[in-house]
């Protein structure tokens, strides 16, 4: 008899990764569960009260353990606090201090789940690493591994996976990529998984109710005030507490009165200024990206679907220049709030081809 | 479902399909306890009651106290039952310190070793926050306590000394009787955490000469949730848990009759087995250590040539291999061992004991603790060595 293939499943304690583990057990794999403990919930902002769905609270670790017990699989908590701090938190804070709006989940995937945990997977003599991401891996006729959007297009999380290296794809499994969320919950219910009715986690796992600004402040230790300027005139409208409280396209909580609705149209770290202006100034066609990761063939001049934030439907854009350091793209239609620090991710139909960080 | 450990004279439960080599964490239940559990459960009265319902449970306690007293070499009335080793240690440190300070306010210093159990370390930290001065006696990489340091630390301001008889991670035995003498010369109280000694070596608190000593039932084939603080006759220690007059007004709370009865039963049946345990387990450990050295290149046995309890082997694995990964691999293959570190509880800090002994963080992360017990067999050891060698070879090839 062939030896069963062994899979390490990253279990967050949420319903998606719990179902992923259950499906693999059902499919006959030898499954080992692991939770990455990324944040010391006892000493920081994380709050373990009900409804605050995080991947770092002890409640979630205990939920994951309960699911592993129900599935009768080995389960381990792997401490990732140090690498999480190094690769995710530090970068998050630095990005905001530079006037950008970062996506920590991409780094968590790239540096922790699919690097650190991948190493653990090999150490535990597993053949694959599985997660509860809504994404699919497909092998093309030519044998190339491709990252494909999930069946549930609303839940699709490929956007957060654009930075994965090509080499890791053959080791990955995304068992829930073929599922639609409502069916997945039904399945969890049917299987009697203890987390079947647990709320979905939303937002960034280590940011509490007070928002990212308060988090950055707690890390930096102080506010860093600067001017609020009218775009494009430069007229000073007031003071702000720090550029890290703001994001492009933001309208609420600006702290100024105006007869017309004003938006954050520019954040300038060089003079610590936040520029406010009418919505029209938020639209543009051009963008430049750096640290581009390529997972599929892309030709210069090709028109692709490009997403500039997680909840962006994607829009047609031409790849104008593919340089060593930077790529430039041009959208067919102007896009609202192209935000530095976010990622531009390219798709051809349902295949993710790559992406880079918006400058 | 029940299979028994190898020794016919003292049997304990064994997990089917698994090899348990983590007896310093807990021990399998003794068969003699298993046999009587239901009987004890039926005696559900409150031992403190005046009416007749309280008599049978009271008798259980009395018998257990006699047996445990006999087991540890004390008078039964010097035995105070607690909820376990951690409570006993907390009580000894806090109660001992408060008592001493009440008698003489200048006595504000507490001496512990650098390798004590967290329940001693954290209790000491608590006292430090209350104004005590905590002095930690260094222990070398080889597992030797710095006795010169200890002696020079003792003075008329020393309230209390708390030193473990045997270390939980490395098994090293410290020279308690001679240390007690030195402490008493300056009028300090001496507490000994004897949790890892009981059942492994002959324990006699009177010959140790200590004022207080902690023991735990579940480290010795009994139920969890029960421990003992031995308090020398004539010594009055401030209570930790206030309330009713149980345990001769020393420790409030209705007694854990089942746990206590189990401890008593083991004490009664086990007392005369300690020396055969010692020999049997020491022979197994020698096999284990020889096997480790033969099949695992670059392995270091911590303080190999120092006096140790017979069942414990602390090792530093060859470089490039994480203890935690080895533990998980072994677990998947059906072996229960532990790392020297507290990783399993979610902490990223490597073993405080090993780093205090001078091992680097990297070395401490490569530590593994193998602790044998009554159920351990020669086959267990052989299978373990084969599995470990294979795992390490694979990990090193990654």
Image (cartoon, rainbow, N blue to C red):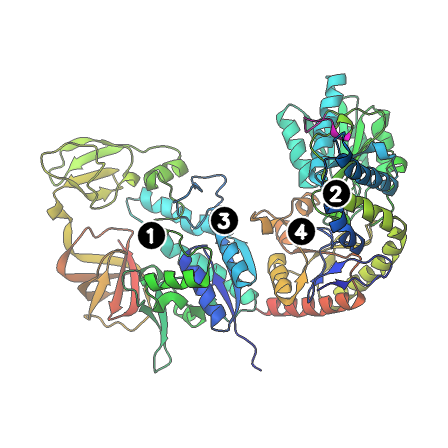
* Camera-side mark, 2 or 4: 2
Q: Check the residue under mark 1 and report the chain it is in.
A: A
Q: Are marks 4 and 1 on the same chain?
A: no
Q: What residue lies at 52% left-to-right and 60% top-to-bottom?
A: A70
Nearer mark to the viewer, of 2 and 1: 2
Rendered location of residue B365, percent (x, y): 62, 53
Q: Secondary structure at mark 2?
A: loop
The answer to which of B280 and B53 lies nearer the viewer is B53
Residue B287 as seen in the image, left or right of residue B298: right
Q: In the rendered view, would you say B317 is above or below B243?
A: below
Residue A96 to residue B397: above or below = above
Which residue is under mark 3? A81
- Where does label 4 land, which residue? B340
Q: How much space separates mark 2 and mark 3, taking CA atoms?
A: 49 Å
- Mark-to-mark CA distance, 4 and 1: 37 Å
Provide the residue span drawn in magenta. B239-247
Q: Secondary structure at mark 4?
A: loop
Q: Is residue B78 above or below residue B102?
A: below
Q: Chain for mark 2?
A: B
Q: Is residue B116 visible?
A: no
User: Chain ID for label 4?
Assistant: B
Whether the residues at callouts 2 and 3 have beta carbons within 8 Å, the answer is: no
Which residue is more in the foreground, A223 or A186?
Answer: A186
Disc 1 target residue: A103
Q: What residue do we see at 32% from left, 50% from top?
A: A102
Is disc 1 placed on a helix, strand or loop?
loop
From mark 4 to mark 3, how far is it between C-alphas?
Answer: 19 Å
State the residue position of label 2.
B43
- Judged left or right of residue A215, residue B86 is right
């Amino acid at each position: 008899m062939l030896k069963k293939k062994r899979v390490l499943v990253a279990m967050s304690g949420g319903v998606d990764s719990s179902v992923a583990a259950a499906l693999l057990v059902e499919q006959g794999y030898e499954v080992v569960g692991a939770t990455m403990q990324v944040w010391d919930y006892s000493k920081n902002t994380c709050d373990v009260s009900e409804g605050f769905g995080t991947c770092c609270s002890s409640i979630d670790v205990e939920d994951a353990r309960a699911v592993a017990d129900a599935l009768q699989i080995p389960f381990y908590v792997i401490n990732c606090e140090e690498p999480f701090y190094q690769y995710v938190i530090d970068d998050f804070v630095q990005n905001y201090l530079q006037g950008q709006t970062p996506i920590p989940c991409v780094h968590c995937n790239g540096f922790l789940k699919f690097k650190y945990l991948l190493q653990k997977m090999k150490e535990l003599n597993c053949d694959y690493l599985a997660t509860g991401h809504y994404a699919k891996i497909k092998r093309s006729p030519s044998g190339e591994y491709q990252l494909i959007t999930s069946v549930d297009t609303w839940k699709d999380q490929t956007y957060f996976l654009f930075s994965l290296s090509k080499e890791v794809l053959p080791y990955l499994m995304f068992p829930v990529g073929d599922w639609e969320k409502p069916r997945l919950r039904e399945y969890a219910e049917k299987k009697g998984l203890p987390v079947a009715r647990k709320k979905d986690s939303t937002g960034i796992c280590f940011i509490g109710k007070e928002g990212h600004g308060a988090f950055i402040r707690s890390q930096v230790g102080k506010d860093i005030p600067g001017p609020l300027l009218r775009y494009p005139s430069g007229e000073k409208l007031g003071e702000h507490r720090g550029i890290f409280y703001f994001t492009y396209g933001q309208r609420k909580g600006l702290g100024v009165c105006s007869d017309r609705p004003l938006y954050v149209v520019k954040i300038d770290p060089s003079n610590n200024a936040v520029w406010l202006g009418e919505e029209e100034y938020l639209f543009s066609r051009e963008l430049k990206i750096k640290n581009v990761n390529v997972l599929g063939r892309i030709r210069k001049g090709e028109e692709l679907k490009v997403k500039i934030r997680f909840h962006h439907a994607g829009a047609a854009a031409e790849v104008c220049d593919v340089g060593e350091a930077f790529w430039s793209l041009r959208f067919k239609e102007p896009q609202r709030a192209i935000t530095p620090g976010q990622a531009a991710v390219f798709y051809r139909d349902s295949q993710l081809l790559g992406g880079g960080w918006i400058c | 479902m029940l299979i028994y450990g190898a020794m016919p004279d003292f049997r304990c439960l064994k997990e089917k399909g698994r090899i348990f080599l983590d007896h310093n964490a807990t021990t399998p239940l003794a068969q003699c306890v298993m046999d009587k559990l239901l009987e004890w459960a039926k005696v559900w009265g409150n031992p403190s009651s005046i009416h007749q319902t309280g008599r049978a449970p009271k008798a259980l306690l009395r018998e257990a106290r006699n047996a445990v007293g006999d087991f540890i070499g004390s008078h039964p009335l010097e035995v105070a039952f607690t909820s376990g080793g951690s409570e006993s240690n907390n009580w000894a440190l806090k109660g001992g310190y408060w008592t001493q300070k009440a008698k003489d306010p200048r006595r504000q210093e507490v001496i512990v070793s650098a390798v004590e159990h967290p329940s001693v370390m954290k209790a000491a930290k608590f006292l430090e926050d209350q104004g005590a001065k905590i002095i930690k006696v260094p222990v070398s990489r080889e597992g030797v306590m710095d006795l010169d340091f200890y002696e020079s630390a003792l003075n008329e301001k020393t309230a209390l000394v708390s030193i473990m008889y045997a270390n939980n991670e490395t098994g090293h035995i410290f020279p308690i009787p001679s240390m007690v003498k030195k402490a008493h010369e300056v009028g300090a109280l001496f507490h000994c955490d004897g949790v890892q000694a009981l059942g492994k070596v002959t324990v006699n608190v009177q010959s140790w000469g200590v004022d207080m000593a902690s023991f735990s039932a579940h480290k010795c084939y009994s139920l969890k949730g029960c421990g003992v603080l031995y308090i020398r006759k004539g010594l009055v220690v401030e209570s930790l848990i206030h309330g009713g007059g149980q345990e001769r007004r020393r420790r409030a709370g209705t007694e854990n009759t089942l746990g206590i009865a189990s401890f008593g039963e083991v004490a009664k049946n086990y007392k005369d087995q300690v020396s055969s345990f010692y020999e049997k387990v020491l022979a197994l450990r020698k096999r284990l250590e020889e096997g480790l050295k033969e099949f695992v290149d670059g392995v270091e046995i911590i303080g190999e040539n120092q006096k140790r309890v017979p069942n414990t082997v602390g090792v530093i694995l060859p470089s490039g291999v994480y203890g935690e990964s080895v533990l998980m691999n072994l677990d998947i293959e059906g072996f229960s061992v532990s790392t020297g570190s507290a990783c399993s509880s979610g902490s990223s800090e490597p073993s405080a004991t090993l780093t205090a002994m001078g091992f680097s963080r990297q070395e401490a992360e490569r530590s593994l603790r193998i602790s044998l017990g009554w159920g351990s067999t020669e086959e267990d050891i052989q299978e373990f060595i084969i599995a470990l060698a294979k795992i390490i070879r694979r990990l090193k090839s990654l």
